[in-house]
Amino acid sequence: MGSPKKVSPSRRSPKRNSRTLHDLFVQESPHFTIPSSSPTSGNEDLLSTISYCTFVFTFTDPSESPAQRDSKRLQLTRLVSILKSSKKPVHGKVLVALAAMISANLFRPLPPPSSPSAITDLPEEEYPVSIFSPLWSHLQIVYEILLKLVNSTDQKILRECIDHSFLRNLLALFQSEDPRERETLKNVYHKIYSKFISDRSFMRKSMTEVLLNYVFETEKHPGIADLLEIWGTIINGFTVPLKEEHKLFLMRVLIPLHKTKGMQVYHKQLAYCVSQFVQKEPMLGGVVVRGILRYWPVTNCQKEILLIGELEDLVENLDPDQYRKLALPFCTQITKCINSWNSQVAERALYMWNNEQFVKMALIGTVEVFNVIVEGMEKNLKWHWSKSVRQLTESVKVMLEEMDPDLYSKGLIDMEAKESMAHLEDIKRKKKWERIEWEAAKNQFLNPQRYIRVSY
C-alpha cells in the first residue's frame, strides 16, 4: 500500500474553517503524563497540563463532546495526584499558573435563579429545591486543588495569588444554587480565614456586607446558611470581653436577620451564632430578646414556632439580674402565642412552662406580669377551639395555682375587674354615639341641607 497523500493547505482550509476553536484547542493539547524526574521537564509538563485545564467547558454547548470533558477531568485528577505526591513546595511559576487556572474555572457567571422568588415566597413548611450544576465533575477537583494549595503552601507565598479580589470572587460563589459547591466552598473559605490572619478583618467585613445586602435589599441568597455556619465558628473563637465591633455585628446584622421571609432556611445557624454571643456575655441576652420580639412575625406560624424555641434556649443563658426587666415583654409575647388560633403555635408556647428558668422569670416578675399570664390562660380555657390546647392550658393553670394560689386568685379578681371596666366603657361609648346621632338628626330636621345649583 502506498503512503497517504499529503493535502495542501489550500485544500484543507474549508475543513479547518468548519472546526470550532474548542476542537483546535483539544487537538493541540496532548494527553499529559506525570512529570519526569527532571525538574525543568517536570515543570514544563505541569505548566502544559495546567494550561490545558484552563479551558472551561460550559456543558451546554452542543459542540462539546463527552470525551473532551472526560479528558479535562483526567488532567485535573492528574494535577491533584502531582500536588499530593510532591514533597517540595510549589514553584513560583507553577503557583501563578495554578491560581490563574483556578480563577478561570471557578469565577464564572452563575446562572440566574431557577425561581426568582425561590427564597422570599416559600410556603411555610417548604425549603428551596437544590439545583445541581453539571459543571460539578470539574469544579469538585478544582476546589480540591485550591484546598491543597491553601493547606500546603506558605501563607506569605500564597498571598501573591490569593488577594482581596480573589477573596471577593470566592465569596460571590456562595450564590451558587448547587449545595455541593457551597458545602465545599464553605470549607475552603474558612480554611483561608484560619490561615490568613492579616486578612480576617477584610473577610469578616465582606461577609457582613453580603448579609446586610440580603437583609435590607434583596432577601435573595441561597448561601446565607453556609455563611452563618462560618460565622458560628468565628464567633466561637472570640475572646471575652467582646470587642465593640463584634457587639455591633450582633445588633446590626444577626438580630435583623430574624425578620426576613426566608428565615426558616437558615434559622438553625442563626440561632447558634446568637447563642454564642449570649453565652460569652450573658448581659447581651436582653438586647437579643428585645430584638427578636421587635421582629416577631404576624402571620408566619412556622417562624413563630422557631422563635419560641430560640427564646427558650436563650432563657437558659440569660443573666438572672435581667429577669425582672425582661419578664413583662417576654411573658406577654409568649401569652399571645398561647392564645394563637394556630394550635401548633399555642402548644409550643404552652410547653415553655416546662422550662424551669422561664417559670422562674415569670414568678420573679411583678403582679402585672402574672395578671397577663392569668388572663391568657382563662381566655384559652373559655374560647380556644382546640381540645388539646385547652387540656394543656388546664395543666399549666393547675401548676400555677399550686405555685402561688393567692397570686393566681388575685389575677382572676383583677381580670374580672378589668372586664367589668371594659364593659362599662363600652356602654358609655354606645351612649355617646347615640347622643351624637340624635343631635345630628335633630340638626338635619331643623336646618335642612340646601343645595346650590352650579351652572357650567
Image: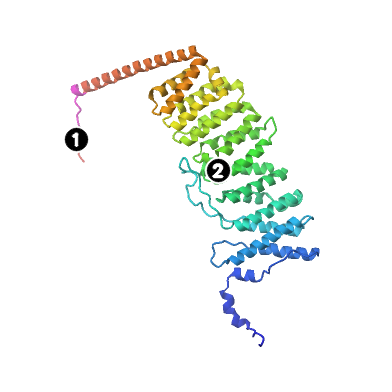
Quadrant where the C terminus is found in the figure: top left
Residue at x 51%, y 14% (from the top left corner) = 404
Residue type pointed to by label 1: Arg
Residue in front for this viewpoint, 245 or 97: 97
Residue extending farthest top: 406
The image quarter in which residue 58 lies: bottom right
Q: Could you say whether the residue bearing mark 2 is in a helix, strand or loop? A: helix
Q: Amino acid at mark 2?
A: Asn
Q: Position of residue 370 (x, y in %)?
A: 49, 18
Residue under the image location 58 percent in, 29 percent down: 314
How many marks the image carries: the answer is 2
Say whether residue 32 is left or right of residue 126: right
Mark 2 burial class by Cα count in 10 Å: few <14, some 14-19, many 20+: some
Q: Residue at the right extreme? A: 38
The kind of secondary structure element at disc 1 is: loop
Magenta residues (range): 444-451
Magenta residue check for 450: yes
x and y percentages locating residue 74 in the rendered image: 66, 62
Q: Nearer the viewer, residue 299 or 399?
A: 399
Answer above or below: position of 66 versus 288. Answer: below
- Rendered-image quadrant of the N terminus: bottom right
Q: Residue at x 74, y 55 (%)?
A: 84
Number of the label disc, if any, that sits on residue 453: 1
Query: Along the polypeptide, which appears first: circle 1 or circle 2?
Result: 2
Closer to viewer: mark 1 or mark 2: 2
Residue 321 picture location, percent across and down: 61, 20
Disc 2 target residue: 213
Quarter-wise, where is residue 246 in the image?
A: top right
